Amino acid sequence: MDVVALNNIEDVINDFRRKNTGVILITHSEEMLELADRAILVCQGQLLKKGSTREISDYFKNECVPCEDEDAAKYNEVSQVG
């Protein structure tokens, strides 16, 4: 995601905050995670952990192990081509 898009999304989220409107944001981006007040880590449809964005980020970086995915080989082939 480029800086302009991130800034635009941040502006929209901040506008919702000013209006006391909640936002559910689903992301794989650490930059987007930083916009949130709290976070939930989900893996293969299961809730693994919830807490502050810092807690979730630290947990993901330091404690998560890659999930076994039946299509993992297919994804690896695509990422190696690019």
Image: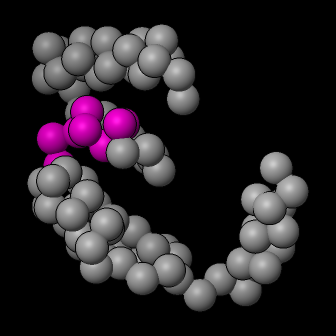
Question: Which SS type dominates the magenta stretch?
Answer: loop
Quadrant of res 10: top left
In depth, the one of 17 and 61 nearer the eye is 61
Is the image coloured rainbow, by chain, by secondary structure, or in one colour? one colour
Q: Residue at x 31, y 34 (%)?
A: 23
Quadrant of res 6: top left
Q: Is residue 5 visible?
A: yes
In depth, the one of 61 and 16 nearer the eye is 61
Q: Residue 3 location, x and y as percent?
A: 45, 18
Q: Residue 70 location, x and y as percent?
A: 73, 86
In the figure, is residue 29 to the left or right of 56? right
Q: Residue 58 location, x and y as percent?
A: 21, 63
| Above or below, comparing residue 78 to residue 36 in the picture | below
Q: Residue at x 25, y 33 (%)?
A: 35
Q: Which residues are magenta?
A: 31-38
Q: Is residue 32 magenta?
A: yes
